[in-house]
Structure formats: C-alpha cells, structure tokens
Amino acid sequence: MGVTRSEEDFDRAKATVEAHIARIEAAGGVFQYCAAYLKHLTALSNDGEPAILRERAATFPRMAVQIAAVSAIKDAREAPLDALTMTRVKEFARAAWIQSAGHYDDSSAENAEVVSHPNPQAMEMIRKGASVRRAKAAEQWDRLVDGKLDNLYALATVGREFQEPPSRKERWTAYIILAGLLVAIAAYVGSNHFLSVKISSPYESDEGFQQHRDATARVTRHSDLMSSTARRAGLFKLILDWPMSPTENEIAAFTKFGSDVIRLRRQMIAAELICGSPVLGNEGMLAVIKTVNNEIDIKNQPLDGFNRPQSMIIQALARSYAPPCS
C-alpha cells in the first residue's frame, strides 16, 4: 500500500526534527547549543541592536534552537541542579527561545545570515515584525514552561499548540455556528444564480429583447460597482461582487445588444443623423450602451427595413443624441 500524503508530511517533519536533534548533540548538548546560539547572536549585533537573522541562512536554525531550549528545561528539572544553576538555565533557555522567534523568513536568494535591507523604512518594518514575534514567543514560554512543555515542544516542531478537547457545550455551539455559516454561504453562493437573468428566448422576440436589455443592465451595474471609489466602497465590492457578477450568458447577451448599439450609432453618425464621435474608448462605449438601454421605449413601432431590436435602438439613439450638435 502506498504512503499517503499526510504520512509523507509526517515523515518529512520527523526527519527534519531528527536532523536538528543530531545537530544539537553534535554541538555538545542542549545547554551548550543554547549558550552558543546566544553568544553567536551577540557577536552579530551592532551597538547593542539585536541582529535579525535570515532563517534560510541561519547558522542556528529556529527549530533547533527552540528544541534545545525546551529540552534544556526538561533536562534541568530531571537533573539535581542547585537553585542558582537552575535559574541560569531558565534564563538562557528562555532567551534562546524568544530571540530565535525573531528570525526573518524570506524567499530571497541572498545567503547573508544577517538581514540588512538598504531601505530604512523596510528595515524598520522587518525589525518591528521580529519584535512582535519575540513578544508572542515570550508570552507562550511564560504561559507554558511551568506545566506544558509538550505544548512548547509542539510549537517548536509544528508551529502550534496541542488543543484541549472541547466541552460538550463548546461542541454544540460550534455545530450551531457551523450550520449558520453553511446556510449563509449557500444563500450567498446561490444568490448569483437567482439574481441572474435567464436568456431563454431569441434576441429578435419581444421577450428575448427584454432579457438582453435586463442582462445589459446587470453588466453595467456590476461595472459601476467595480469602478466605485467612494469611501468604504471596497467593502461593498467584496460583499456584492459575486451576487452581482454577470454570468457568461448575461455577458453574451450584453455583447450582442451592445454591438448593435455601437454599430448603429456609427452608421447614424456617418449619416449625420445624430451627434457624437464615431471613436469611443471602453468607458465611453459603456456609457452609450447604458444610456440607450435606459432610453428605449418598447411602445415604439418597428421601422421599415429593421428588426424590432434594431428599431428600438435607432429610435433611442435619435432621442439621446439628436442634432443640433454643439
């Protein structure tokens, strides 16, 4: 039977941890490894400013340092150490844990161990990020070191704590919240289908022409929403984009209707029947299509030589852009 992906991930993580443990043992053990890391970090610092190490190029990788820090506390508790020595072990294990959390993960090809960004603002952001990670690591260490070393070890190796089993009340609360979310998601996703225009009749028929006009209105409304720059418009775009997003059929209907509008407009301008420039950008064409769609009067009678949609469009163009031209 083949190895599943989860088993492969587990084996890969286990191999990484074992490699770090071998590195720690080769350096003389957990106490020596933590002490050597802190000494190395001090040597790389300038004027007392803590150095930010690149994790990819670090001589002392974060996981190895944190494994050593937790193991140092564990070994110290099992060994008959005097109070002063125990205090010193706690201090440098804690310092090693916290400082290693400040390592900087980046994907650059640069192999330098110490981060030194040429942009002062970018460097300040990197330092602030490291400070935030160190503060979080300090909170985790102080909260867990006296009772839950297994959780510290899990943080070092897999990046998260073991979760306590939820109570019955918490499970039921979670189920209710999940059910509510599923209903909301289903309604949100389904809203696009229910709000969309169904194109079921030919374009030349009265019903089909109206469907194409409704689809065009949907497309132009969506375009107006997405181009909105009003304050807090971004939130409305995020929420309304999917329900208002036109379907492929609606876009096809808009394209058919819009193509007729633009083609007939050019012909009427060339014949000097209406005003306007024959050449328009995308925004200009969209504005014309929207104007014509709003101006159409379905009570108008068809013109000789044109089908009903073309007749409605021609009459709407004549009303909207009638001479004299300014």
Image (cartoon, rainbow, N blue to C red):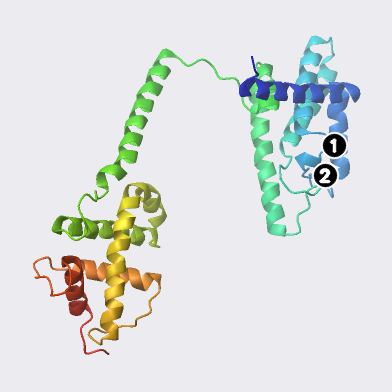
163 relative position to 234: left or right: right
Q: To which quarter of the image does residue 78 belong?
A: top right
Viewer-side residue, 284 vs 269:
269
The residue tagged 1 is 59
Amino acid on which disc 2 is placed: Glu
Q: Are marks 1 and 2 in contact (CB under 8 Å)?
A: yes
From this view, report whether residue 158 is shown above or below residue 126.
Answer: above
Q: To which quarter of the image does residue 33 belong?
A: top right
Name the quadrant of the N terminus: top right
Q: Residues within 10 Å of mark 1 (few under 14, many from 20)?
A: few
Task: State the SS at label 2.
Answer: loop
25 relative position to 275: left or right: right
Q: How many marks?
A: 2
Sequence-first disc among 1 and 2: 1
The residue tagged 2 is 113
Amino acid on which disc 1 is placed: Thr
Whether residue 264 is visible, yes or no, is yes
Viewer-side residue, 263 vs 227:
263
Q: Which mark is residue 119?
A: none
